[in-house]
Image (cartoon, coloured by chain):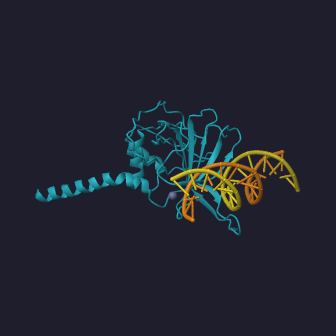
Chain colours: A cyan, B orange, C yellow
Amino acid sequence: MENSPLHGGICQQPNTQLATASCLLAPLPPVVAEPQPEQQHACTDAPPTSLAPGAAMSCPSLPAAADWASLLLPPSTSGASEVDCAVSAVTTVAAGSKAGATAGEGDNSKTVKAGKQGGGRGKNKVTRPRFAFQTRSENDILDDGYRWRKYGQKAVKNTAFPRSYYRCTHHTCDVKKQVQRLAKDTSIVVTTYEGVHNHPCEKLMEALSPILKQLQLLSQLQSCTNQLL
DNA sequence: CGCGTTTGACCCGCGC
DNA sequence: GCGCGGGTCAAACGCG
Ligand SMILES: [Zn+2]
């Protein structure tokens, strides 16, 4: 079942804006942060494919924000394989630049053993959400705004290209992600995030600070205006 | 020197 | 019990 790890309708939207919005909405959206003046054009949109049973992921024509919100917190408990409802949407990333392209994403609570070397005897099974993203990019390394440290690389069966394992460098954060390319479509990179960041993404903040500043300014201005009225 | 990547070894669950 | 496949560790190495 390694093939077609994601299924479902395709929801796609402009990346940069989209990424920013989702980041603001959710505390830890694994999205790209670099607001690059990239021309983002919608990739080939496909007609809504039949969703797999259990994946009640519907992507009606909604504003980007709403769409993502629904994507980020789907109440439905899906019972599929690894990444349950992985909506596939591929955003094209221009080569040479790290523009964000997000694709599908599935939430899955997987039981993983927490204990490890040296006395982690606890059968402590922690369930943490997993999100799968698919990106069409020539570049392997996509900067999503967080800092990752690679801790492993392994070749998986039936996959010509190795899979890389990354971990968030924050001490208070043990989010992991793995990146691999599709065997057939070399141009597609699948990124699977595991867990949630419990810290802000400073890169995103940095990129956003001017905008936020201006927002504050506008807010003040508005309040002043209201008082005058 | 501090930090991130490389890379083989190790571990562990699972199927036979 | 053993082999395999996938995930992680950690020493060594490289770079700014
Ligand atoms: Zn993190």
Give how far across and how far down residue A109 sits, in percent: 58, 54
Residue A26 appears in the rendering: no
Q: Quadrant of residue C1?
A: bottom right
A225 left or right of A73? left
A111 left or right of C16? right
Front-lying residue, A161 or A111: A161
Front-lying residue, A189 or A11: A189
Location of residue A84 with respect to C1 vertically, above or below: above
A126 left or right of A198? right
Residue occupying the point 61% across, 37% down: A182
Residue occupying the point 44% across, 59% down: A200
Give how far across and how far down residue A46 sits, in percent: 49, 30
Front-lying residue, A69 or A187: A187
Q: Quadrant of residue B16?
A: top right
Give how far across and how far down residue A145 sits, in percent: 46, 51
Location of residue A187 with respect to C13 vertically, above or below: above
Residue A147 appears in the rendering: yes
Q: Quadrant of the N terminus of chain A?
A: top right
Location of residue A128 with respect to A154 vertically, above or below: below
Give how far across and how far down residue A80 sits, in percent: 61, 45
Q: Quadrant of the C terminus of chain A?
A: bottom left
View extreme (bottom): residue:
A119
